[in-house]
Image (cartoon, rainbow, N blue to C red):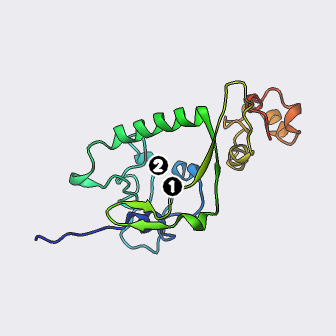
Amino acid sequence: RGTDIFISTWNLHRSPELWENPETFDPTRWERSFKNANVNGWDGYDPDKVSGLYPNENAADFAFLPFGGGARKCVGDQFAVMEAAVTLSLVLKNYDFTFEGSPDDVGMQTGATIHTMNGLNMRPKRVTPSDELQSTGWWERQHLKRGLTASGKPFQSKEEVASQNVPKPQRPDDPGNACPMA
């Protein structure tokens, strides 16, 4: 009683015992289950248990706690996620960013929250609606690896599956063509 306990969510969220390739940027990780039989008593992550805008402590058996968990969980978590998504979409709609320096220059400072030690230096460039959207193809490759079309839709026929081996400009039926590749 009267003792403060600090749980390092930074370490928890990057633990290779709890997450598949935790240091890799992979937004699709939330679409698939993960369980490590070597972690006694941990039920793993189950995407079918997600009940809100983001994976919660129940879906991850308390291995994912961006807003805490249980009775002391942040009451504004859903609002914070929506507010961040709206703000980020407005910023990305109007600006393109180039990272200045190297990731090692950023540094990390921890406490009750995590901060950059030296700032996250970016060079913004204003974009206009007439600027052409360029894709690196990363999302398309992720969809294809998961057995989906390049645009992320399920295949409708065997012919459609075969067409994925045809160069992209020759596949006008794929809605993913609306976004030209870089």
> What's the amino acid at mark 2?
Pro
Local secondary structure at mark 2: helix
- Count of numbered badges drawn on the protein: 2
**Residue drawn 38% across and 73% down?**
40
Which numbered disc, 2 or 1, marks the residue that appears first in the sequence? 1
> What's the amino acid at mark 1?
Ser
**Residue drawn 73% across and 41% down?**
135
Q: Do the numbered discs 2 and 1 sit on residues whose CB atoms are within 8 Å?
A: yes
**Residue drawn 48% across and 63% down?**
35
Viewed as shown, does residue 40 lie left or right of 87? left
Residue 34: x %, y % from top left: 51, 60
- Quarter occupied by residue 42: bottom left
| Relative depth, front residue between 62 and 6 | 6
Position of 168 relative to 105 (above/below): above
Position of 166 relative to 172 (above/below): below
Viewed as shown, does residue 38 lie left or right of 160? left
What residue is pinned by disc 2? 47
Check the picture and name the quadrant holding the N terminus. Answer: bottom left
| Relative depth, front residue between 109 and 169 | 109
The image's mark for residue 64 is: none
Check the picture and name the quadrant holding the C terminus. Answer: top right
Q: Which class describes the residues within 10 Å of circle 2: few (<14), some (14-19), or many (20+)?
A: some
**Residue drawn 54% across and 36% down?**
91
Q: Which class describes the residues within 10 Å of circle 1: few (<14), some (14-19), or many (20+)?
A: some
Residue 7: x %, y % from top left: 32, 67
What residue is pinned by disc 1? 33
Residue 166: x %, y % from top left: 88, 39
Viewed as shown, does residue 7 lie left or right of 39? left
Q: CA distance from mark 2 to mark 1?
A: 6 Å
Local secondary structure at mark 1: loop
Viewed as shown, does residue 85 lie left or right of 72? right
